[in-house]
């Protein structure tokens, strides 16, 4: 009744939705259905659900296909669960955290920017990364920037090997390298600690996120610099 009252009273053409930890997945799903039934435009959707909710997360995400700007999902989903969107996401950015094995990386290709937290429970294989990078880099998909974070050592090397398989690798500096493929397309990769970010050439030249990486490398260099005694 309260939600109905709010949606009827405050006529908004563009809304942002937050679901914090403690909200029942069933409540989040019902709310999203109510919003979509009214054909309201959702700019951003943020959902933090730590209760086991594998049976409802797909239905919640299917209600997010028309979100325009950003989707963030941090959810407790079993590692053996997989999700395929019923329709491609229209959001410019998608960010998936906590347990993320359920997300097929292909599902991010309709977004301009994607961020996936891997973590110690990641079960992705060399074959998965090889297949995804080939599919993405061979396509004209919307995806321009992919960030992978909280990467365990063995998986970090797995990802780097899969990227190297895509073409000729050229180091730019300590943190950056370039992959040039047989079709002449180019991708630029920033690596640091447990973090990898991959840019298309277009995104790299447009400086999408590059300032952030440059600031990080400058801070690291400053922190590691040996101070001479006065």
Image (cartoon, helix red, strand yellow):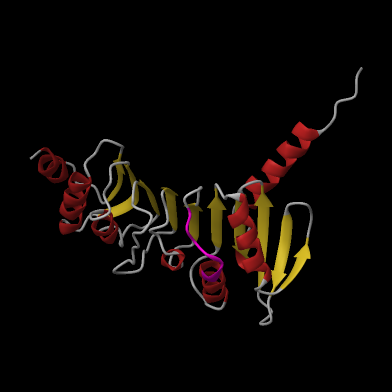
Farthest residue to the left: give it: 1
Residue occupying image coordinates x 53% and y 72%: 136
Q: Nearer the viewer, residue 99 or 26?
A: 99
Q: Nearer the viewer, residue 81 or 116?
A: 81
Farthest residue to the bottom: give it: 183
Q: Nearer the viewer, residue 204 or 82?
A: 82
Residue occupying image coordinates x 56% and y 78%: 138
**Residue 204 visible (yes or no):** no
Q: Is residue 126 magenta?
A: yes
Location of residue 215 in the rendering, given as x and y in whole percent from the top left corner: 68, 42
**Residue 3 visible (yes or no):** yes
Location of residue 116 in the rendering, given as x and y in whole percent from the top left corner: 48, 53
User: Where on the picture, by quarter, is residue 184?
Assistant: bottom right
Residue occupying image coordinates x 70% and y 47%: 214
Q: Nearer the viewer, residue 154 or 75?
A: 154
In this picture, which residue range is highlighted in magenta? 122-127
Quadrant where the N terminus is found in the figure = top left
Magenta region, mostly helix, strand or loop? loop
User: Where on the picture, by quarter, is residue 189?
Assistant: bottom right
Location of residue 82 in the rendering, given as x and y in whole percent from the top left corner: 35, 62
Location of residue 93 in the rendering, given as x and y in whole percent from the top left corner: 45, 56
Q: Is residue 161 magenta?
A: no
């Amino acid at each position: 009744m309260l939600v109905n009252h709010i949606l009827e009273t405050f006529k908004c053409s563009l809304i942002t939705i937050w679901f914090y930890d403690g909200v029942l997945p069933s409540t989040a799903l019902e709310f999203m259905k109510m919003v979509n039934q009214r054909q309201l435009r959702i700019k951003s959707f943020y959902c933090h659900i730590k209760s086991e909710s594998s049976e409802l997360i797909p239905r919640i995400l299917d209600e997010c296909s028309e979100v325009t700007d950003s989707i963030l999902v941090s959810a407790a989903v079993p590692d053996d669960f997989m999700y395929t969107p019923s329709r491609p996401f229209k959001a410019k950015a998608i960010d998936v955290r906590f347990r993320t094995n359920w997300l097929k990386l292909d599902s991010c290709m309709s977004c301009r920017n994607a961020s996936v937290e891997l973590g110690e429970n990641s079960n992705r294989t060399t074959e998965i990364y090889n297949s995804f990078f080939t599919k993405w880099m061979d396509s004209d998909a919307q995806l321009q920037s992919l960030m992978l974070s909280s990467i365990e050592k063995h998986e970090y090397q797995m990802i780097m090997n899969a990227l190297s398989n895509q073409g000729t690798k050229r180091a730019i500096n300590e943190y950056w390298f370039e992959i040039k493929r047989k079709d002449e397309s180019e991708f630029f990769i920033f690596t640091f600690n447990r973090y990898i970010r991959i840019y298309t050439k277009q995104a790299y030249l447009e400086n999408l996120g590059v300032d952030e990486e440059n600031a990080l490398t400058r801070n690291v260099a400053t922190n590691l610099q040996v101070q001479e005694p006065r």
